[in-house]
Image (spheres, coloured by chain):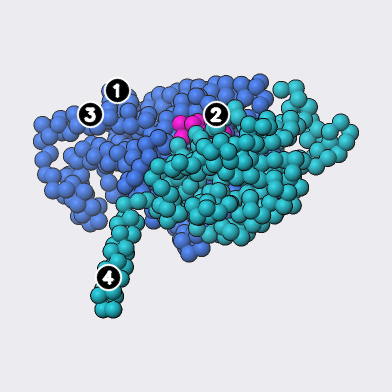
Chain colours: A blue, B cyan
Amino acid sequence: MKSNNKGWTVAYWIVVLVMLAVGVVGWYWRLTTGHQMSNYGSIIPWGLWVAMYIYFIGLSAGAFLISSLVYVFGIERFRPVARLSLFTALVALLMALLQIWVDLGHMGRFYEVYTRPHFLSMMAWMVWLYTAYFLLLLAELWFDTRHDLVRWGERSGVSGFLNRVLALGSRDTTDAAAKRDAKVVKVLGTIGVLLAIAFHGGVGALFAVDKSRPMWHTGLYPLMFLLAALVSGGGLLLAIYALLAPDRGSEQHKDIIDSLSKLVLGLVLLYVLFTFADYSIVWYGSIPLDVNPLKIILAGPFWYVFWIGEFLLGMVVPIVLLGLKSMRRSPWWVGLAGLSIVIAFVAVRLNIVIPPLAVPEIAGIAQAASSPRMSTMYLPSMMEWFVTVGIVGFGAAVYALGYQLLPVKPRVSE
Amino acid sequence: MNSDRREFLKFAVGGAALSAVGAAVLPGDSVAEAAPAKSQHRWGMVIDLRKCIGCEACSVACSMENDVPLGEFRTIVSTYEIDTGGQARRATLPRLCNHCENPPCVEVCPTQATYKRDDGIVVIDNTICIGCGYCVQACPYDARFINPETHTADKCNFCVQRVDEGLLPACVETCVGGARIFGDLNDPDSEVSRLLQEYPTEVLKPEMGTDPRVYYIGLSDYLQAKVDGMPVPWSKEEILEGMTDGSAN
């Protein structure tokens, strides 16, 4: 068992290092040649990177909201995964910010959103809310782990050093201090829930306020984004907890997996309902600018993104695996269901961003001029893929290091 | 002689200091700064489609004047081959920024890089634009793009650099059939005002509530129905289907 674990760890790091190497190439291209090597253009100016950004930020919001079940709403059953959720939220947020930063035409000008914000713009709100959320996550995670940071700080080696540094000189391990920490965490968590709803509902609104894209312009979007965040964040935690928890195989592990599975299953079913409501009403109305993106989603050249990605992996597989009691008791199947959701939501996000852009607002615009930038067909370029692979590798590396060196592992019950 | 020179130097230094202050206080692009604080003008354009021959001279003049990169256009004449009741005909639709009264692109800009001047011209300060592309999505007329050379949002600005000096926009000046007429909507005697009074005019996508300042004469029904967008590649059958859809609506 032990050596088997070691094998997995080595395999994991090999994959991560390859991804990082690919990422270095991608970022080098991006930073030296700007956007020249990208495939997004004038008709489809937002592509893979924007989709991955809302994907990562959704994972972050979802993981954070799940941690709040424990810290804010006191559902102790999920206590073992609470801190890991917080840590997941932090890493996913870092990935999201990197991903959207690289998409800017001028990466060096991001500070303009701080120095001269325009608060009628949802995007300006996003930047400010992310900043608040980032600081809050750091604070909440610090107060939540402080006690363990102090204790781990007594270790030798890299982990000890890192924990000593992160403890910021704090040494108090008394019960009173722990109680105070818990109180602070509860307050921060409560603010955080509001922030998470604001910023992720806000990302939905960022798209929804765009009246010139009818497919986005629906009041359902902010709610759908929040739900998508919960499903994808829940799926990620399910996968991580089912496959990695130190107490795998114990009764407690099985019980928690069972509860978490039911939670995620409920969220998936709700997401199916939302998707059906959205798509069926668009279809019924059949306003060309509204329904044509849907036709592209369902039967366009990238039909498989919906049918295999969203439908099979995001709906059928998790509903079957999490719905059957016998499957739900097996960490492997549950982990697989979680992974299936995690992959499916990349497809969900791609279909949110790209097809509504692939239908020009003025007919024939793509034929009016012959230019690769004036195309309704979009497939990410190699540079785009490499940059994103690098960001995933970065996230995976930070996550694994944190998991190894910091007190964020799922707690084994006393 | 000597004192003259001193006077001149004083003037020059003062002028430089003044313009330095101007650059620090006023956002951005020098053309935008040149506009008076409260403008008497309200610039607008009338496009008389009966006179447009689809020669694209406007597109070329615009690209020359504004140094628009290859493959992108601030204005272009979209042309359509349309089958009207068994008769083939060509329809042209010159397109540019509509300089809307309620511009959706200005609302969404996170840094106030794009804004509407007092004289109604919607401009972009490309020293502040972060290149996020949000305005490109928000424009219902596909009038904006990210300039692949500056990496900032770009679009027609009615040639502010010319208009502020009392010249006509390049496309208007060059228009072969005189289909593009530019002028002051506040001035009841201007040619645009007279045309708006004399002829029925239409704007693109009035249902968007953007209140465009580019008006069309002769924007016929089939063309209006065409501009609701259609997936490509599209075939003749689909165009016909779209037309019947359009008339049914």
Q: Residue A187: which numbered mark, if any?
A: 3
Image depth: mark 2 or mark 4 in front: 4
Residue B56 is situated, as x and y percent measured from the top left of the image, at 71, 52
Extent of the magenta region: A205-212
Quadrant for the N terminus of chain A in the image: top left
Q: Nearer the viewer, mark 3 or mark 4?
A: 4
Label 2, label 4: how far apart the Cα atoms are: 55 Å
SS for callout 1: loop
* Viewer can see residue A142: yes
- The answer to which of A228 and B29 lies nearer the viewer is B29
Mark pair 2, 3: CA separation: 44 Å
Asked which quadrant contains residue B198, the reply is: top right
Q: Quadrant of the C terminus of chain A?
A: top left
Which residue corresponds to mark 1?
A73
Q: Are marks 3 and 4 on the same chain?
A: no
Name the residue located 40 percent from the left edge and 24 percent from the top edge. A259
Residue carrying label 4: B7
Residue B44 shown in magenta: no
- Residue A382 point in image, percent of width and height: 57, 56
Tell me if residue B248 comes above or below residue A253 in the rendering. above
| Tag 2 and tag 4 share a subunit | yes
Q: Secondary structure at mark 4?
A: helix
> Which one is closest to the eye, mark 1 or mark 4?
4
- Cα–Cα gap, marks 3 and 4: 67 Å
Q: Can you tell which mark lies on residue B209?
A: 2
Crowding around mark 4 (Cα neighbors within 10 Å: few <14, some 14 to 19, many 20+) is few
Nearest to the eye among marks 1 and 2: give it.
2
- Which chain's residue wears label 2? B
Kindly check if marks 1 and 2 are in contact, taking CB atoms under 8 A apart as contact: no
Type of the residue with mark 2: Gly
